[in-house]
């Protein structure tokens, strides 16, 4: 099997089992859970070169490389992580983790509840970003990593990276948060609720216990994905990709697909409904809604971030209207007020929120330069 230069090549996931109960923000606890991970590169002798990659809503532990039996399934941040790439696996030991509650191998709603010997389904407890970070800290313990060289993520992944600096300030040297925010806006919560309502309204949802009915709420998942996908793109990007292009020369006066943008959204919805779990969608969007580290400080973000001791890189994109640059600048200003060392890059890119996943030379140069400095710190 041939690979492009910079590929980590064939990779394989690992499942890490935790027997001790994990207390959750809700007051519930989950015991006997597993986290699925992938690793790339080599951990150095003093274990100082480890980088944790946190995923966003519909991604997973599969950050880079390919699977031997699925060579088309390239890792979701393969353009960022690998030999000679911005996060260079010739220098760093990179860990991709699938969060608790997801549907890609870690314990989640599809897993068997040992108490009932049936899938958790709707009974799986609501989880938060803080819960995920606590589970990731347990993972670090198992891997023998006392301090991450960096924790990095985009969107919801950036929220996890930020939360690491508050929850475990002595266990993270650098935080890289891309296209992220200190909390969701009311508009973002509204989008999430519309998507969840589409899923819950699907007759095949069965109150979240659709596994027992051998059904999948595909219609709801399709609509949820279509709503989400619209918010990930900018108006400029959609106009460039689709405009008002039509499948036929003129209107057909029906409600099936006529515009190319309709075809694209339905394709994305259909594809998503085949691989993503509806209960997981509800869980992860609610975790997004709940993230608000300043809630415990009366809305004072400066006070909320005060425990942080890490150095920071924040990156935002001008056309990202779901997580606009102003939200990243809120974090930057709070860090400066705390005397923290922070670098900030605002990239003028046309691709909306999805820009954090794409190839942009300016964006990748910023990340590469930042990780080059981390590598020099480790080697010093």
Image (cartoon, grey):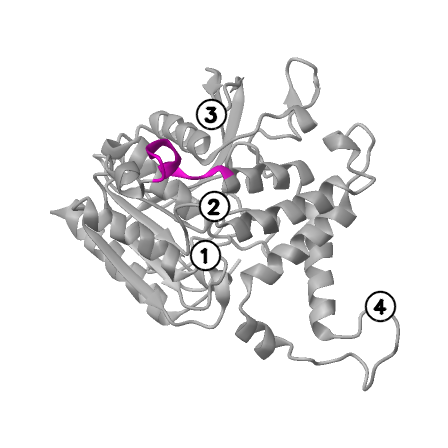
Q: How far is mark 2 from mark 1, CA to CA?
A: 16 Å
Could one spot residue 87 in this view of the protein?
A: no
Labelled disc at residue 256: 4
Spot the residue most to the bottom.
249
Residue 188 left/right relative to 86: right
Spot the residue most to the front.
298
Q: Which residue is mark 2?
A: 55
Labelled disc at residue 323: 1
Q: How far is mark 4 from mark 2, CA to CA?
A: 35 Å
Residue 264 left/right relative to 304: right
Q: Which residue is mark 3?
A: 25
Give the x, y percent position of residue 308: 24, 38
Q: Nearer the viewer, residue 104 or 46?
A: 104
Q: How far is mark 3 from mark 1, CA to CA?
A: 25 Å
> Which of pointers 3 and 2 lies earlier in the amino acid sequence?
3
The number of numbered badges drawn on the structure is 4
Mark 3 lies on a secondary structure that is: loop
Q: Nearer the viewer, residue 110 or 163?
A: 163
Up-down: is 152 above or below 3? above
Q: Residue at x 75, y 75 (%)?
A: 259
Q: From which residue to which does the magenta span run?
A: 290-299
Q: Quadrant of residue 299?
A: top left
Q: How far is mark 3 from mark 2, CA to CA?
A: 20 Å
> Which of pointers 1 and 4 lies earlier in the amino acid sequence?
4
């Amino acid at each position: 099997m041939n690979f492009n230069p910079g590929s980590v090549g064939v990779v394989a996931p690992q499942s890490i089992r935790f027997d001790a109960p994990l207390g959750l923000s809700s007051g519930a606890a989950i015991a006997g859970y597993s986290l699925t991970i992938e690793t790339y590169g080599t951990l150095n002798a003093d274990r100082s070169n480890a980088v944790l990659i946190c995923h966003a809503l519909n991604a997973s532990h599969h950050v880079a490389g390919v699977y031997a039996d699925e060579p088309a399934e390239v890792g979701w941040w393969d353009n960022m992580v690998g030999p000679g790439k911005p996060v260079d696996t010739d220098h760093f030991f990179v860990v991709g983790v699938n969060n608790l509650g997801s549907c890609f191998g870690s314990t989640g709603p599809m897993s068997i509840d040992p108490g009932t010997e049936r899938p958790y389904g709707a009974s799986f407890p609501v989880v938060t970003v803080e819960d995920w970070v606590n589970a990731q800290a347990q993972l670090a313990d198992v891997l023998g990593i006392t301090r991450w060289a960096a924790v990095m993520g985009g969107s919801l992944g950036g929220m996890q990276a930020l939360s690491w600096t508050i929850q475990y300030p002595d266990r993270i040297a650098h935080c890289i948060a891309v296209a992220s925010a200190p909390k969701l806006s009311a508009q973002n919560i509204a989008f999430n609720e519309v998507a969840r309502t589409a899923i819950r309204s699907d007759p095949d949802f069965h109150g979240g216990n659709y596994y027992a009915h051998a059904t999948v709420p595909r219609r709801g998942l399709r609509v949820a994905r279509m709503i989400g996908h619209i918010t990930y793109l900018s108006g400029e990007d959609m106009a460039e990709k689709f405009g008002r292009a039509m499948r036929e020369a003129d209107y057909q006066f029906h409600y099936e697909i006529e515009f190319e943008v309709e075809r694209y959204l339905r394709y994305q919805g259909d594809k998503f409904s085949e691989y993503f779990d509806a209960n997981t969608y509800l869980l992860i969007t609610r975790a997004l809604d709940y993230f608000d580290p300043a809630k415990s400080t009366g809305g004072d973000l400066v006070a909320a971030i005060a425990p942080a001791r890490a150095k920071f890189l924040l990156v935002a994109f001008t056309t990202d209207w779901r997580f606009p640059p102003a939200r990243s600048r809120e974090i930057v200003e709070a860090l400066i007020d705390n005397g923290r060392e922070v670098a900030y890059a605002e990239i003028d890119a046309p691709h909306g929120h999805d820009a954090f996943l794409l190839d942009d030379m300016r964006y990748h140069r910023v990340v590469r330069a930042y990780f080059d400095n981390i590598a020099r710190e480790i080697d010093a």
